Image (cartoon, rainbow, N blue to C red):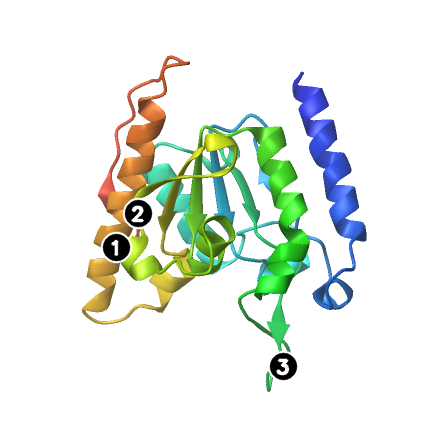
Amino acid sequence: MSDAREARLGEAAIAAAACRKCAIGYERRNNVYGEGDPFARLMVVGEGPGETEDELARPFVGRAGRLLDRMLLAIGLPRNDVYICNTVKCRPTLPGPNGPRNRAPDAQEMENCRPFLEEQIAIVAPEVILALGSPAAKWFLGNDFAITRMRGRWYIGPRDTPLMVTFHPAYILRQTGGQIDGVKRLVWDDLKAVRTKLDEAPACVVETVEIRQGTLFE
């Protein structure tokens, strides 16, 4: 059964790599489809690949990805136990003085990539989805979603899956001064809610996990 699910994800990744609906499909180095446990209880969805992800063909492996790994470990979830992907599979860029720089995917790019993420969710069938950042939240909940006011609540995602929205790790890393402690507290509250939701799942026996805030942003 595991092999069958992995095979389905592999076939879907090949189809995504062949897609050229958007200009970024011709500009990117690699298609960054997603990775992780095909039976993951938690799916993490970001906005799009960055420079390091585009180079290595893996999601969340740059500086923000390292922070995400620590965030997940803080609630007892090693990266390998989670499925991680993005709303778009190609790196969106803008011209910069030192070469292309990252940008958020636009609405049409996310719509063009929608079938790939929908298929990932259907194959993995996670118990909980964690959306990181405003673009990912809007993919699930519409363009009126305002992350500052509306994060930290439970929503109903695809397949009636509980959906939590929190700030993107890259946003956390951009904070300075007195702002950073407040953002950390909000994200920590959201992560604890995800852990609690997973622990409440009636269909499986869940080992009690100690969660430690001190590990989150070190």
Quadrant of the rendered image containing residue 117 = top right
Per the image, label 1 sits on a secondary structure element best described as helix
- Label 1, residues with CA under 10 Å away: few <14, some 14-19, many ≥20: some
Q: CA distance from mark 2 to mark 3?
A: 33 Å
Which amino acid is tagged 2?
Leu
Label 1, on which residue?
184
Which amino acid is tagged 1?
Lys
- Label 3, residues with CA under 10 Å away: few <14, some 14-19, many ≥20: few
Query: In this view of the protein, which residue sits in the foreground, 165 or 1?
Result: 165
User: Left or right of 68: which side holds 103?
Assistant: right
Quadrant of the rendered image containing residue 74 = top left
Per the image, label 2 sits on a secondary structure element best described as loop
Residue located 29% across and 47% down the image: 152
Query: In this view of the protein, which residue sits in the foreground, 28 or 108?
Result: 108
Circle on res. 216: 2
Question: Against 94, is 14 above or below?
Answer: above
Residue 59, image x and y in percent?
58, 50
Query: In this view of the protein, which residue sits in the foreground, 138 or 92?
Result: 138
- Label 2, residues with CA under 10 Å away: few <14, some 14-19, many ≥20: some
Residue 119, image x and y in percent?
65, 37
User: Left or right of 71: which side holds 192?
Assistant: left
Which amino acid is tagged 3?
Pro
Residue 140, image x and y in percent?
48, 48
Label 3, on which residue?
95
Asked whether the residues under the numbered discs 2 and 1 touch, taking CB atoms below 8 Å apart as contact, a structural biologist would say yes
User: Left or right of 210: which side holds 173?
Assistant: right
Mark 1 vs 3, N-terminal side: 3
